Amino acid sequence: MRQLLTTVFRFLLRHALQFLLFIVILLAGRHLLAEWREFQAISASVGILRAAASTGEQHGATLAQAASTRLAALEHASQAAVEARLAKVQAQRAQLHARQAASLFTLPLPDASQLAGHARQEATRQVEIEVLAQEARYLGALQAALRGDDARQLLARRHREHVQAYAALQANLQQQRQLELAHPLAAHLPGSAAYGQMAPLEQQEERLRLANLDAYQQYLLQRARTSNAVRPAPFAIDTPALENALAPLRQTIRTSEARLAQHWLARWRAPVLEVIPMAALLVLSAILTPLAIKAFFYFVLAPLASRLKPLSIAHELRLDGAGACPPLAPQSRISGVAQALLLAPGDTMLIHPAYLQSSPVGTRKRTQWLLDWSYPFTSLAAGMAALTRITSSEPASVTLSASDDPLMEVSVLHLPPGAALVFQPRGLAGLIFHGQQKPAISSHWRLASLHAWLTLQLRFIVFRGPVTLIVRGTRGVRMEPAGQGRSISQAATLGFSTGVLYATVRSETFIPYLRGQQALLNDRFDGDGVYLYEETPRHGKQPGKVGSWFEGFTDAVLKVFGI
């Protein structure tokens, strides 16, 4: 019952958490979608408003040119023509002011084209109103100037009339003074001839004074009526005022741009767009550079290495290659899940604790921290540390098996005196030597060999007999004769006798190497001797596909040191 309740609870909890996760994902997706739509709408509106402003500017320039042409033709027209054009302009302005913009709150909602059309119409309407207003002001000034010209002409006539009336009055007064000088008394004595001449002059003087006074008053009245309006200069469009007609639209654009700039998508979009070319170049380089390097290694360096002289460790050590070869087993497979061997009195076994399955109670066991204190780094890197040292004063049967890996098999390889084997310590589970005589282990660097550099195995570790090696390998260990030439994957190679001619050969096909399914080079063995390999290698099985960069780096370092 308890198990049933636990199962049900886990089932409900798991699906409840999935339900909550789906809710969070849907809400986040809805929020991001809304943010994206808002960003797109603001971007579209900014583009529409900019296009409308550009259209308004172009339309305003066209209208300004047409208005300049029309008003240039009216500069010398009659006052009636000017008044007719002014009335027409005022009617057009009233019509534009009365025209209402179409409502945007309709169902269905207007699309981008309708919004763009509305913005263009409003921009052109504002520009047309401003151009007509400037034209109306100019026509009003021109009309006032024309009226002022007529008034000034009448004022000049009134002035001439006053001058003539004044001149006639002065002429009459001059005649009267001459008559008084000629006849001082008779001019004022009734009945005399001089008086007869003076009386009509005095009567005429009265009429002339009235005429002069009337002409002067008419002149003053006309002068008061006459304005000082002058003829305006040729019409020129007021560009700042015309641009100011689009000021609300530009203010809306600035507001939308500021809102767009504050949006988090806009803040991220500019840096992303800025680094996209470099990122694309880096991705392209990351794709093409390994291909180029692999092609160079496969078609240039690997064929060159295949034509080089093979290595002979026996020649370097001045050994007899045939005599240094360990005995060949009747079957190539020399391993098994478990191995039972007899530990002779005086023999010492160094074994990894994970491979010691059973041993007699009477044997003496203690810990040996390193396989060989002369090679501490090699011992530690190969995992041959904290070993179990077993000795016995009488024959002891010891069973060896891998307790931590069901795919691992072990084999026992006897190296007689004089035999030498190049071996990678990673395949070593332990060894047996007689008495206090330590196993002879030596290392040999090959820095001048292109084979070594291409395979990154610059050091070869040699085990010399008499010694018994306990070898481990995944799915089994095989030992085969080199003969007339054998090729094997480098990842599978465990070791080879010193009499073997060791070389590298390029893998047969390029595509598997390019895809990382095969290594660039395989090991090749020729001549008299044997080589060992594990059936299913784990180390370097897929070159370039390591679990992590650090793991790949450490594998390369261990390979350099022949481990």
Image (tube, rainbow, N blue to C red):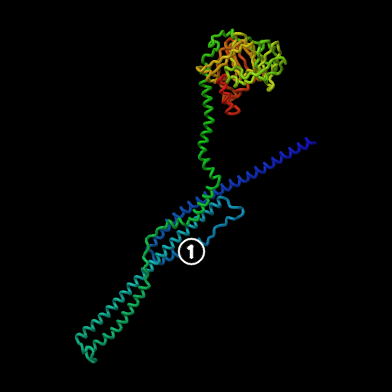
Residue 110, image x, y percentages = 58, 52
Query: Residue sitting at 52 percent across and 31 percent down?
Result: 285
Q: Which residue is mark 1?
A: 91
Can you say whether 152 is above or below 323 in the image?
below
Residue 106, image x, y percentages = 60, 55
Work out whether residue 112 or residue 200 is closer to the camera in this orientation and state it: 112
Q: Is residue 349 visible?
A: yes
Work out whether residue 553 or residue 230 is closer to the camera in this orientation and state it: 553
Q: Residues within 10 Å of mark 1 (few under 14, many from 20)?
A: few
Q: Is residue 333 visible?
A: no
The amino acid pointed to by label 1 is: Ala
Q: How many marks?
A: 1
Residue 84, image x, y percentages = 44, 65
Work out whether residue 548 or residue 442 is closer to the camera in this orientation and state it: 442
Which quadrant holds the N terminus? top right
Which quadrant holds the C terminus? top right
Outermost bottom residue:
191
- Label 1's element? helix
Outermost left residue:
182
Q: Is residue 246 left or right of residue 29?
A: left
Residue 511, image x, y percentages = 57, 24
Image quarter for residue 220? bottom left
Can you say whether 18 is above or below 79 in the image?
above
Query: Residue sitting at 55 percent across and 44 percent down?
Result: 265
Image quarter for residue 440? top right
Query: Residue sitting at 60 percent across and 24 percent down?
Result: 542
Can you say whether 36 is above or below 432 in the image?
below
